[in-house]
Image (cartoon, rainbow, N blue to C red):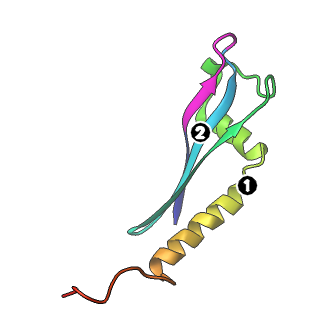
Amino acid sequence: MNTTWTISQLDRKTADGFVTTAHWQATAVDGEHTASIYSTCSWADGTVNTPYADLTQEIVLGWVWANGVDKQATEDALAAQIALQKAPVTLSGTPWGQA
């Protein structure tokens, strides 16, 4: 299983350019199965103080993980989603009208 973490958007103050919120996504792929989790992480004013122009995705992901997003738990949840895709425990549908 391959897991990719990305920052899709940053919200920042116009006055000083410092980031207040990061929108992140973790996506896991295992063959034909894919699972993803999307969320945000916010900081109080002045908590993160790297100027916007100096940021990299790696820096912001480090902030996200340091601010309470459990990287391993998130990746474990993605693995569990993929496991359910491979071996579902519930199914939907009707027994009629199927060929």
Residue 35 percent location from the top left of the image? 49, 62
Image check: 61 left or right of 99?
right
Q: Is residue 14 magenta?
A: yes
Badge 2 element: strand
Relative to 38, does residue 60 appear above or below in the rendering? above
Q: Is residue 76 magenta?
A: no
Query: Along the line of sight, which residue is nearer the eye, 5 or 81?
Result: 81
| Residue at 70% from the left image edge and 42% from the top image edge | 64
Amino acid bearing label 2: His
Amino acid bearing label 1: Asp
| Residue at 52% from the left image edge and 77% from the top image edge | 84
| Residue at 63% from the left image edge and 61% from the top image edge | 75
Residue 98 percent location from the top left of the image? 22, 86
Quarter of the figure with residue 6: top right
Badge 1 element: loop
- The residue sitting at the left extreme is 99
Image check: 95 left or right of 59?
left
Quadrant in which the C terminus is drawn: bottom left
Q: Which residue is mark 2?
A: 23
- Label drawn at residue 93: none
Query: Along the line of sight, which residue is nearer the eye, 80 or 30?
Result: 80
Residue 95 percent location from the top left of the image? 31, 89
Tell me whether the residue at label 1 lies in contact with that at label 2, contact meaning CB atoms closer than 8 angstroms: no
Q: Earlier in the sequence, mark 1 or mark 2?
A: 2
Q: Which residue is mark 1?
A: 70
Which stretch appears magenta? 8-16
Relative to 13, does residue 24 appear above or below in the rendering? below
